Amino acid sequence: MAREDPQTIPPELLLRAYRAGIFPMADSRDDPEIYWVEPRMRAILPLDRFHLSHSLARTLRRGRFRVSCNTAFDAVIDHCAAPRPDAEESWISARIRESYRDLHALGAAHSIETWMTGPDGVERLAGGLYGVGFARAFCGESMFSRASDASKVALAWLVAALRRGGAELLDCQFTTPHLASLGAEEIPQSEYLVLLAQACRPLQPGEASLYCGAASSTGASSSPAVSGAGSLLALGFAALEADAAGSSSSPGNFIAQSLTHTS
């Protein structure tokens, strides 16, 4: 782990690190320094083996939550960085938060949000997740939940959107009981790097035009290091919404069906 002096991390450097299987962390929310992490064991969630439990499928079908993509990135990362009861100090420092906001502005960092309407009729953010997308890979960074199953619903939509968009690798970095219950598994870093290289292979001509078009619509930079990054999630999410709108099912039921048929 190598430490770096305080400053916002340039987006190009962040994406190069992710493409090399490395990511930044901090010791605390107030730590001005970061260190680069390359775990010996890596958690991934195979996109074709997402575990949709009966209770989660029921939650999706009931439509308790409205789900969106990239509509409240700042709020999601702030919630993820906030202190939590009985939890260790957050590794998402102010420097890391600002660095990922910069990456989001370039179309390379994304959020999935879950919303719930309260008894007062007001819709509020109930949970969500954020991460970094590039080529055919998505690296999940953190998630939070303020209502039961809110983050699980966000993850279910993430998996469905990535599969719909043609992604191949969902990186979870470190395994947790929560992620393991949803199908995450741990593999050696050396094996992860092989999967990462496969996911980062050059896009075919048809793919390149499709992905770059999606990226431009989400405000991605023209920089070679950033162009087209993360577009698979936005593309897949938009396609899912269109598919759900054209079906006879509710959006949640449509997602539950799609995950059940392919899990």
Image (spheres, helix red, strand yellow):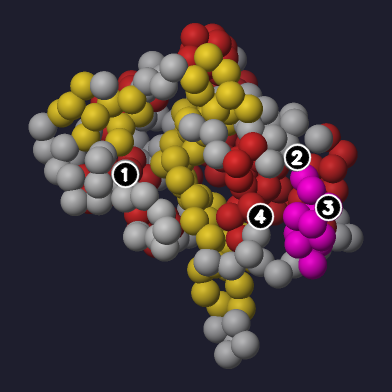
- Disc ID at residue 51: 2
Q: In the image, 167: left or right of 202? A: right
Q: Which amino acid type corresponds to the residue marked 1 in the rendered image?
A: Trp
Q: Secondary structure at mark 1?
A: loop
Q: Viewer-nearest of labels 2 and 4?
A: 2
Labels 1 and 4: the sequence-earlier one: 1
The magenta span reads 52-62
Residue identifier under label 3? 54
Report the residue marked by disc 4.
153
- Quarter of the image holding residue 153? bottom right
Pointers 3 and 2 in contact (C-beta within 8 Å): no
As measured in the structure, the alpha-carbon distance from the residue carrying label 4 to the one carrying label 3 is: 13 Å
x and y percent of residue 214 in the render? 53, 39
Disc nearer the start of the sequence (4/3) = 3
Q: Secondary structure at mark 4?
A: helix
CA gap, disc 3 to disc 2?
10 Å
